[in-house]
Amino acid sequence: MQVETEDAIQTAIAWQLKLAEADEAVWAAFVAWLEESPLHAEAYDRVAATDRLIAEARFPEPAPIAENDNLPAPRRWLWWTGGAAAAAAVALAIVPTIQPRAQTYQVATRDGERRTVALGDGTQIELSGGTQLTLDHADSRVATLDHGEALFHVRHDSRAAFTLTVGGVAVQDLGTVFNVTHLDGRMSVAVSEGSVAFQPGGAAVTLRAGDAVSARDDGGDVARTRVAPALVGGWRSGRLSFAGQPLHEVAGSLKRLYGTDIALRGTLSERPFTGVVQFSGVADRDVPRLAELIGATWRRDGGQWILAEQGPSAP
C-alpha cells in the first residue's frame, strides 16, 4: 500500500508539470487518471497542499563539515538521507502552482446546427446555430459568448458564481436558466428561472424570471422588457418571440436555426416586429408564412429567399 501511495504521488507531481501546458487531450487523460483510484485523488490533494505551503517553508543551511570529519559511517548515511529528503522537498517547491493557467477553447455551431455542452460543474449550455462560445478547461465557472445565441442551465455555487462575458458586459448567475444573444454589436438576456446579475459596466441590475434586457455590447443603450418565462429559449422548439425587434433579427434567427438565407428589400430590414411565431424548420412553409405575417411579397432566387414590401414602390 505504501509503494502504491508513493507511486501515485510521483505521478501526481508529473501531472502538475503537464497541466501547465495541457491541451484538451491531456486534460481528458488527467481526469481519467483521477477516476481510476481514490489513491490518485488523495495523492494529488497532498501534492497540492505541499505546493501551497512549500513557498513559505524556510530550509536551514546544512552545517559545514570539517575536512577531518570522523563521524561514524551510520551517522553520515543518515545525513545524506536527510539531504535526499530536502532535495525531494525542493523538487516539490519548483513544481508550478496547482492552479493551471487559463486553457481556453472554442465550441462552435454552423447555421442550422445545434449542440449541447456539459461542463464539469454540472452546468449545461445549449447552442443555437451560428454560435461560438469560449470556455476554459481550467475554470468551468467562466465563459464568453463570442457571437450567436445560447441557453444556459447553470448549477448555482455560492462560493464561485458562474460569469458569462458578452462584449463588455458581464452576466453573473444567481441560480438560474437564461438565454443570451450576441449579434451585430448588440446583446440581450432573458431569464426563464431564478435570477442573474446584469453588469453593463456600472452597478449590477438583478434580472428575475420573465425579465429581459438588451444593450449594445459595450454596455450602452440599455432597455428592459418583460417576456413570458415559457418563451425564453423558445428557439429549441421553433417558437420564437419578438417584441419590437427589427425584421433583420427575425431573418437572422431563421438563418441560425435552419440555415435559411433571407434577404430583406427596401425598408423591411429595420421594420419592427412584435409577435410569437411557430416555425416548422421547413423553409417552403416558414418563409411564405413570415411574408404573410409582415405583409410582404416573397420569391426564391437559388438558395436565397427574397422578401420585399408590397405595392408599386417595392423594388
Image: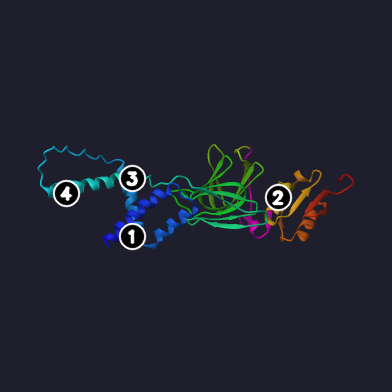
* Numbered circle sitting on residue 252: 2
Q: Kindly identify the residue that appears in the image at 38 percent across and 47 percent down.
A: 98
Residue, disc 3: 52
| Disc 4 to disc 2, C-alpha distance | 77 Å
Residue at disc 1, secondary structure: helix
Residue at disc 4, secondary structure: helix
| Disc 2 to disc 3, C-alpha distance | 50 Å
Residue at disc 2, secondary structure: helix
Where in the figure is residue 231, as x and y percent of width and height? 64, 56
Q: Earlier in the sequence, mark 1 or mark 2?
A: 1
Q: Is residue 188 left or right of residue 305?
A: left
Residue, disc 1: 39
Q: Is residue 174 left or right of residue 232?
A: left
Does 33 appear above or below 314? below
| Disc 4 to disc 3, C-alpha distance | 31 Å
85 is within the stretch colored magenta: no
Please, what is the three-letter code of the amino acid marked with disc 1? Leu
Q: Could you tell me which quadrant the C terminus lies in? A: top right
Residue, disc 4: 77
Where in the figure is residue 49, as x and y percent of width and height? 32, 49
Q: Residue furthest front?
A: 68
